[in-house]
Image (cartoon, rainbow, N blue to C red):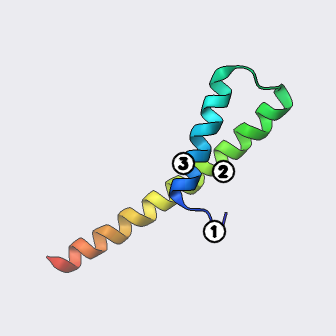
C-alpha cells in the first residue's frame, strides 16, 4: 500500500462495502474482501491521523 492514496483507498473500500451489501458474494471472496477492507480502514485512519497532526503543527506555527 506504499503508493496508495487516501482517495483510491476510500473508493476501493466503498466498492467493497457495496459488494458486501449486495449479498451476492461467495463466502470465500467475502473473507478476502473483509480482510482487504480492514487493511484499507487501517490505512485511511493512519493517513487521517497523520494529516491531522501535520495540519495542527502548521496551525500552531501560524499562531
Closer to the camera, 42 or 14?
14
**Distance between the Cα atoms at labels 2 and 1?**
14 Å
Task: Give me the residue at 52% from left, 57% from top.
Answer: 6
Crowdedness near tag 3: few (<14), some (14–19) or many (≥20) residues, C-alpha within 10 Å: some
Task: Give me the residue at 57% from left, 54% from top.
Answer: 8
Q: In this view, does 49 lie to the left or right of 29?
A: left
Q: In this view, does 53 lie to the left or right of 39?
A: left
Question: Considering only order in the chain, which callout, 1 or 2, is on the residue closer to the N terminus?
Answer: 1
Task: Give me the residue at 51% from left, 55% from top.
Answer: 7
Q: Where is residue 61 in the image (x, y as percent from the top left)?
A: 22, 80
Looking at the rendered image, the disc whose residue lies closer to the viewer, 3 or 2, is: 3
The reply to whether discs 1 and 3 touch (Cβ–Cβ < 8 Å) is: no
Question: Considering only order in the chain, which callout, 3 or 1, is on the residue closer to the N terminus?
Answer: 1
In the structure shown, which secondary structural element does the residue marked by tag 2 occupy? Answer: helix
**Distance between the Cα atoms at labels 3 and 2?**
11 Å
Residue 12 disc label: none
Residue tagged 2: 39
Residue tagged 1: 3
In the structure shown, which secondary structural element does the residue marked by tag 3 occupy? Answer: helix
Residue tagged 3: 10
Crowdedness near tag 2: few (<14), some (14–19) or many (≥20) residues, C-alpha within 10 Å: some
Amino acid at each position: 500500500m506504499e503508493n496508495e492514496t487516501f482517495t483510491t483507498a476510500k473508493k476501493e473500500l466503498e466498492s467493497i462495502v457495496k459488494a458486501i451489501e449486495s449479498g451476492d458474494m461467495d463466502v470465500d471472496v467475502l473473507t478476502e474482501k473483509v480482510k482487504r477492507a480492514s487493511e484499507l480502514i487501517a490505512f485511511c485512519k493512519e493517513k487521517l491521523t497523520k494529516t491531522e497532526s501535520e495540519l495542527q503543527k502548521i496551525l500552531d506555527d501560524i499562531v
